[in-house]
Amino acid sequence: MPGAFTIVKQKVVLRSRVFEVLHENWRGPDGRAFERDTLIHPGAVAILPFDSQGRLLLLRQFRPAARAWLLEIPAGTLEKGEPPLACAKRELIEETGFAARRWRKLGAIRNAPGYSSEVIHLYKAWGLTPASGVQDADEHIKLAVMSRPAVRRAVRRGRLCDAKTLCALLYVGVM
């Protein structure tokens, strides 16, 4: 598309432990001005782990923003300067108690590009072996080992509605 979009002015309106929110004034290629609030996020990873029997290791995790327990794949936020695969390896151990010998990058998604800069890097992991890790203090997680048919049923029944999980399942052909 011809022309450029230009940020005219930015102001940090919220800074948290993980992200910040910017109030921005923009000018479009046609010269018109508009405003946006943008959540600036360091990015994240999400891992679709398979055990030796082809079952998926999912998590039942309480998500305060959703006010509910969600069924989802292990995931976590990138630390400053951390490569996505290193983050994925760390998060898999912390959240499931397993490490993986095999890894494949599935792709990357933007789950809310209308207001967030977050990019989630998706990985498949297999060749799992027990490993010791410590969950973050604010995480409330229960491991759920599920067969592919059970995962598909959970999706059809609306029990699995997490976007990153659905995308990863599509990448590997489970859905």
Image (cartoon, rainbow, N blue to C red):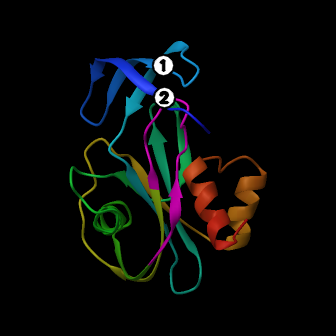
Q: Amino acid at mark 2?
A: Phe
Dot 2 or dot 1: first in sequence order is: 2
For residue 5, which numbered disc appears in the image?
2
Instruction: Provide residue 91's location: percent of width, then percent of height.
Output: 33, 61
What residue is disc 1 on?
27
Instruction: Provide residue 127's location: percent of width, then percent of height.
Output: 43, 86
Tell me the residue at 41%/52% (across/down).
Answer: 141
Whether residue 147 is visible to the viewer of this picture, yes or no, is: no
Tell me the residue at 28%/63% (across/down).
Answer: 83
Q: Amino acid at mark 1?
A: Arg
65 or 25: nearer the viewer: 25
Instruction: Provide residue 134's location: percent of width, then percent of height.
Output: 23, 59
Q: Does residue 69 sit above or below 52 in this rendering?
A: above
Q: For this view, does 141 lie left or right of residue 159?
A: left
Q: Does residue 147 sit above or below 76 in this rendering?
A: below
Whether residue 62 is visible to the viewer of this picture, yes or no, is: yes
Tell me the residue at 26%/49% (across/down).
Answer: 136
Q: Estimate the spatial distance between the alpha carbons at disc 2 and disc 1, rounded to whole Å.
A: 6 Å
Secondary structure beneath disc 2? loop
Q: Dot 2 surroundings within 10 Å: few (below 14), some, or many (20 or more)?
A: some
Q: Are marks 2 and 1 in contact (CB under 8 Å)?
A: yes
Q: Does residue 165 sit above or below 92 in this rendering?
A: above
**Magenta-highlighted residues:** 104-120
Residue 155 placement: quadrant = bottom right
